[in-house]
Image: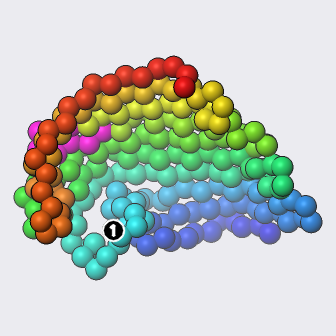
């Protein structure tokens, strides 16, 4: 089966994909690529479970995103196809209706990939950066993980200052839900687990 220049939509997120799939008695062979075309941060938010509700249209947001990926290789009793998924979010912000402040400076640079074959240990998770700010709160993180099935090799960092009493100004909380804690962190990890 061959797919040429196709478009799909999941809630507000539009994807373009091309590729082929070959089905045999004992395996399937995939060769697909996909990417987003002129999508916004709001269209990405629409695929989060529970977010695409009737009042979703009232959420104010802006920012650029780019999703792209591929799936290539055989799927059988012993093999798994390889894949490569990249998600980029740049200069995004989000403000819920009726709340005074917004989540801002939302940035993400993430790649998750593995090579084709039976070895699931060749998965690589590379979160080059994640950042978000609201009011005077900041969160910055990174993670590089290899060999997740055997000898986990990890390098990560987390820096944050979070006054949780400010959450009610940027995200809707349930009735009776209230936070007052302050969380600060400056964590760096490197090594094998």
Element under label 1? loop
Q: Position of residue 157 (x, y in %)?
A: 37, 27
Asked whether, in this view, residue 122 is left or right of residue 60, the answer is right
Q: Quadrant of residue 192?
A: top right
Neighbor class of circle 1 (other Cα within 10 Å; few <14, some 14-19, many 20+) is few
> Which residue, as the protein is rendered here, is positioned at the far right?
25
> Which residue, as the protein is rendered here, is positioned at the far bottom?
54
Q: Is residue 18 above or below residue 140?
A: below
Is residue 134 within the magenta segment?
Answer: yes
**Which is nearer the eye, 169 or 96?**
169
Asked whether, in this view, residue 57 is left or right of residue 67, the answer is left
Seen at 21% across and 72% down, the residue is: 58
Q: Position of residue 63 (x, y in %)?
A: 30, 52
Q: Quadrant of residue 49?
A: bottom left
Q: Position of residue 2 (x, y in %)?
A: 77, 67
> Which residue, as the protein is rendered here, is positioned at the far top?
191
Asked whether, in this view, residue 51 is left or right of residue 149, the answer is left
Asked whether, in this view, residue 29 is left or right of residue 38, the answer is right
Seen at 48% across and 70% down, the residue is: 10
User: Which residues are the magenta region?
Assistant: 131-138
For the question of whether residue 188 can be seen, the reply is: yes
Seen at 35% across and 51% down, the residue is: 64
Q: How many marks?
A: 1
State the predominant SS element of the stretch in magenta.
Answer: strand
Q: Position of residue 108 (x, y in %)?
A: 38, 42
Name the quadrant of the C terminus: top right
* Residue topped by disc 1: 51
For the question of whether residue 91 can be seen, the reply is: no
Seen at 53% across and 40% down, the residue is: 111
């Amino acid at each position: 089966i061959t797919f040429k220049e196709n478009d799909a939509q999941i809630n507000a997120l539009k994807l373009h994909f091309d590729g082929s799939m070959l089905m045999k008695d004992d395996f399937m062979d995939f060769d697909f690529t996909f990417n987003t075309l002129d999508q916004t941060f709001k269209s990405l938010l629409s695929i989060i479970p529970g977010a695409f509700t009737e009042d979703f249209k009232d959420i104010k947001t802006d920012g650029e995103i780019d999703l792209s990926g591929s799936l290539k290789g055989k799927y059988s009793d012993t093999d798994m196809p390889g894949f490569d998924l990249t998600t980029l979010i740049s200069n995004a912000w989000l403000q819920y209706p009726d709340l005074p402040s917004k989540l801002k400076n939302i940035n993400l640079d993430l790649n998750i990939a593995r090579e084709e074959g039976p070895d699931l240990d060749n998965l690589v998770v590379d979160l080059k950066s994640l950042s978000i700010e609201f009011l005077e709160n900041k969160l910055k993180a990174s993670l590089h993980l290899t060999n997740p099935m055997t000898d986990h090799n990890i390098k990560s960092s987390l820096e944050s200052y979070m006054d949780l009493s400010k959450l009610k100004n940027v995200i809707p909380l349930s009735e009776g839900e209230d936070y007052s804690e302050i969380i600060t962190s400056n964590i760096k990890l490197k090594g094998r687990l």
